[in-house]
Image (tube, rainbow, N blue to C red):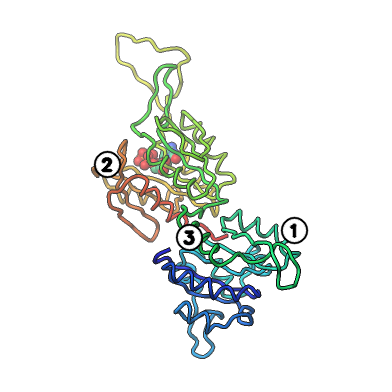
Amino acid sequence: MQGKHIVLGITGSIAAYKAAVLCRLLKTAGAEVKVVMTPAAKAFITPLTMATLSKNPIAVEFYNPENGDWHSHISLGEWADCLLIAPATANTIAKMATGIADNLLLTTYLSARNRVAIAPAMDCDMFAHTATQHNLDILRSRGVGIIEATEGELASGLHGKGRMAEPESIVESVAALLSEKKKSLQGRRFVVTAGATTEAIDPVRFISNRSTGKMGYALASELAERGAEVTLVSGRTALPAPQGVRRVDVLSAEEMYEAAAAAFGNADGAVMCAAVADYTPETVSPTKIKKGDGDMVIRLKRTRDIAAELGKIKGGRILVGFALESDNEERNAQAKLESKNFDFIVLNSLRDKGACFGTDTNKVTVIDKNSYEELPLMSKHEVAARIIDRIEQKLPNR
Ligand code: CTP
C-alpha cells in the first residue's frame, strides 16, 4: 500500500461514518488518499472531517463555485491506482452499471484507468433485490472488485446482509487487489496472430521463415493475465500455449486468415504479430516431388494480406501491426501503418542487436499517426506490456 494513490469515493449511506476510520487506516498503511464525495454523502459525514484525515481538499462538485477552480475527474481517474467507493449505495452501483455520469464521483469512475473496488452498503432488501444483484454482476464482469457486504444489524433496524464491510477488511481487500495483476481487460476479446506460416510445396516440403513466435506469445500471455479472452492464431512454433489462452493452430497464410477473421468478428481488437508468407506455391503437389537432373522453378502466387483485410472491416476496433524492416525502416513502417489501417505499428529493425527472431529481448519503435516512441532494449514480455498499455489507452471506456 506504500505510496499507492487511492481515490476514496463516499456516497450517501449511514455507513459513511466508517469512511473516516477507513481513510485513516489507508493513510497509516502508507497510501496517499484523495476523497471524492457525492452531494448526498455530505449529509452523513463532513468534508472537513475527510479533508483533515486525508490531508487533501475534498472534491464534491465539478468546480468550486467560489473561484471557478475545476476538479478534473480525468486527472483523478488517471492519478488513482485504485478508486475505492466505500460505502457504495444501491443508487451509485446502479449508475455505475449503466454509465450514468451525474456527479463527480461517477465521472471519476468512468475515467478510472486502474483498479476499481466498491464496498456496498444498504438495507438487506435493497441488497437482495434482483436489480442490485444484477448491477453487481455487471460490475464484477468488468473487473470491479466487490468487497462483500456482511450480515448483521442494519440502520433500518432490520437484520440481514447489507452492512458495509469493516474498514480493516476493506483495506485488506484493497491491498490484495493492488498486489494482483490488474484485470484491466476483463470482458475484452483479442485476437493475436503469432509464429511463422508454412506454405506447402508437396507433402514433405514447405516455405516458411525464421519467426519463433516469442513476441506474439508474450503478447497473448500478457493480454490473458490482464483478464482478456484471447484467441491466439498460431503458425509454426515450438512454444507451449500460454495459460488461459485459446490457441488455434494453423499452417498456411490462408488458414491463418480464416481463423483470424472468424475470431475478429466479436473481438475488441487484434494484434498482428505473425510472420506471414507473402507468397505461396501456385500449385501444391499431392505427391513428393522427385528430383530431376536440371534446376527447378516453383511459381509462387500472392497470399492474402490478413492485416489489411482486417483493417478494411475494423470499424471502432483496435488493430495493431508489426513491421520488420532492414532498411528505410521508419518510412516503410509509416506506409504499412496507413495501408493496413493500423491504430499503431511496432517497428522492428533487423539492424538492432538482441531484437527480432528467436531472442528473448526486443528493441522496438512504436509509431502512430501523431507519435514516434523508441523503446530501449527490453525483454519481449516487457515490450508486450508496453504495447498492451498503449492498446488500453486507445480502447474506449466501458
Ligand atoms: N501481415 C499479415 N498478412 C500478410 C502479411 C503481413 O497479416 N500476408 C501483417 C504482419 O503480421 C505484420 C504486418 O502485416 O503485422 C506487416 O508485416 P511485414 O511482413 O513487415 O510486411 P509486409 O506487409 O509483408 O510487407 P513486406 O514483406 O513487403 O515488408
Residue behind mark 2? 350
The CA distance from mark 1 to mark 3 is 30 Å
The CA distance from mark 2 to mark 1 is 58 Å
Three-letter amino acid code of the residue under disc 1:
Thr
Name the quadrant of the N terminus: bottom left
Q: Quadrant of residue 157?
A: bottom right
Instruction: Nearest to the eye among marks 3 and 2: give it.
Output: 3
Residue ranking furthest to the bottom: 66
Looking at the image, which is closer to me, 252 or 93? 93
Instruction: Nearest to the eye among marks 1 and 3: give it.
Output: 3
Residue lying at 75% horizontally and 61% vertically, measured from the top left? 129
Q: Position of residue 124 (x, y in %)?
A: 73, 64
Q: Quadrant of residue 348?
A: top left
Disc on res. 253: none
Name the quadrant of the C terminus: bottom right
Residue behind mark 3? 175
Q: Please state the quadrant of the image where ligand 1 appears.
A: top left
Looking at the image, which is closer to me, 373 or 388? 388
Three-letter amino acid code of the residue under disc 3:
Ala
Residue lying at 37% horizontally and 38% vertically, measured from the top left? 214
Three-letter amino acid code of the residue under disc 2:
Leu
Q: Are marks 3 and 2 in contact (CB under 8 Å)?
A: no
Disc on res. 130: 1
